[in-house]
Image (cartoon, rainbow, N blue to C red):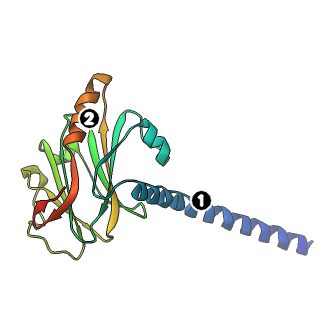
Amino acid sequence: MKKLLFWGITTLLLASAAHIATAVVMPRMERERTLQNLTSTLNANQLTLLDQAKRGTFDLKGISPDLAVALCPFDITSQPVSITAPLPGFYWSVSIFNLEGRNLYTINDKQVGTNQFSALIVKNSEQTDVSEDAPQRRGEGIIIRSNTDQGIVLLRIFIPDRASMQRVENVLGLTRCQTVSNGISSS
């Protein structure tokens, strides 16, 4: 009886450990695989609009079909990356992730306070000429320090109705994600 109880408890503990490990590790591995797929498929430091067909290709889960989505894999190995985006007048957000899926920075339309979003992604160790606490509300942009050289910028814009789609596409057409050299953006 003791032997049966021992093996029953041992089996239960091993099964619990395997379940917990799977529940913790698998989502992280899936997220990292998706981010690696995005960064290897899309051009670095270039904004790409994901239409419905491309969303299926990258297996992006949990993003509403009412949102226009654009991605910019960034690489700041040699130069910082600048992001500039006009505001469409309704909900939008910019999220910046490292390749492990950790959020480095997120901002939305309510937090900006101007009609233009501007940011510079730099290495943690890099010195900048721009004031660290330059408030976005004055249109001076923000500095986002990254502890990794590569990551991804995710831009989401709400599409309230079909008539607004052209406006959203125009905003995305004016949005830039590009390297910066000596304070001058390069295309």
Whole-percent x, y for residue 102 in the image: 39, 62
Q: Amino acid at mark 1?
A: Ala
Q: Are marks 1 and 2 in contact (CB under 8 Å)?
A: no
Q: Residue at x 83, y 73 (%)?
A: 6
| Residue picked out by circle 1 | 23
- SS for callout 1: helix
Q: Looking at the image, can residue 139 be seen?
A: yes
Q: Nearer the viewer, residue 126 or 73?
A: 73
The image quadrant of residue 135 is: bottom left
Q: Amino acid at mark 2?
A: Glu
Q: Look at the image and tell me in which quarter the C terminus lies.
A: bottom left
| Residue picked out by circle 2 | 169
Q: Residue at x 29, y 29 (%)?
A: 165
**CA neighbours of label 1 inside 10 A, class few (<14), some (14 to 19), many (20+):** few
Q: Residue at x 49, y 45 (%)?
A: 57
Q: Nearer the viewer, residue 180 or 64?
A: 180
In the rendered image, the residue lying farthest to the right is 1
**CA neighbours of label 2 inside 10 A, class few (<14), some (14 to 19), many (20+):** some
> Relative to residue 157, is residue 34 depicted above or below?
below
> Relative to residue 7, is residue 138 depicted above or below?
above
In the rendered image, the residue lying farthest to the top is 163
